[in-house]
Image: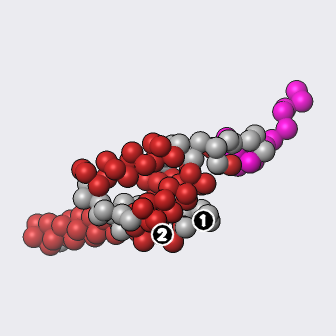
Amino acid sequence: MNKMNRRLKFLGMGVGTVLFFSSASTAVAEVDPPLPKGPHRAVVEETCTPCHSAAIILQNRMNRKRWDETITWMQKEQGLENLSSKTRNQILDYLEAVRGMASPAGKPSPETHRMYEYDYPPNPL
């Protein structure tokens, strides 16, 4: 095999590798966890998720006042449109119910929020 053919073969392998990994990372980036069921979930999906993923919502837990302050910050700094008081309250109702400090998800129990998927009995030895 001459030098030119080896270079082209090497270049082809490199391009193929780059394309494989870039498509794999794109597939992973497109996965977005669904928002939990709750009052006014559709309003939150329509208003919030066009700008950021549901994962941003799910990684936060705040009381109603802090969620309200966050919405105000998004309006001032991130270009979120002005919301009617009805829409704003529906969003806050949802966030308080599923991602609030008093929500069931805010109080993990050992039975439902284990560190590992399986519990193994202790080694008897």
Q: Is residue 77 left or right of residue 91?
A: left
Asked if residue 74 is positioned above or below residue 109 in the image, the reply reads below
The x and y percentages for residue 10 are 21, 65
- Looking at this view, is 3 or 80 the one in front? 80
Provide the residue designation for mark 2.
43
Residue 67, above or below 27: above
Q: Position of residue 4 (x, y in %)?
A: 10, 70
Position of residue 123 relative to residue 55, above or below, is above
Foreground residue among 58 and 10 = 58
Residue holding disc 1? 39
In this image, 45 relative to 50: left or right? right
Q: Mark on residue 9?
A: none
Cα distance in 3D space between marks 1 and 2 = 9 Å
Q: Residue at x 36, y 63 (%)?
A: 83
- Going by the image, does 50 lie left or right of 63? left
Position of the N terminus, as image quadrant, is bottom left
Q: Magenta residues, as a range?
A: 112-125
- Tell me the SS state at disc 2: helix
83 in the magenta segment: no
Residue 49 image offset from top left, x and y in percent:
40, 65
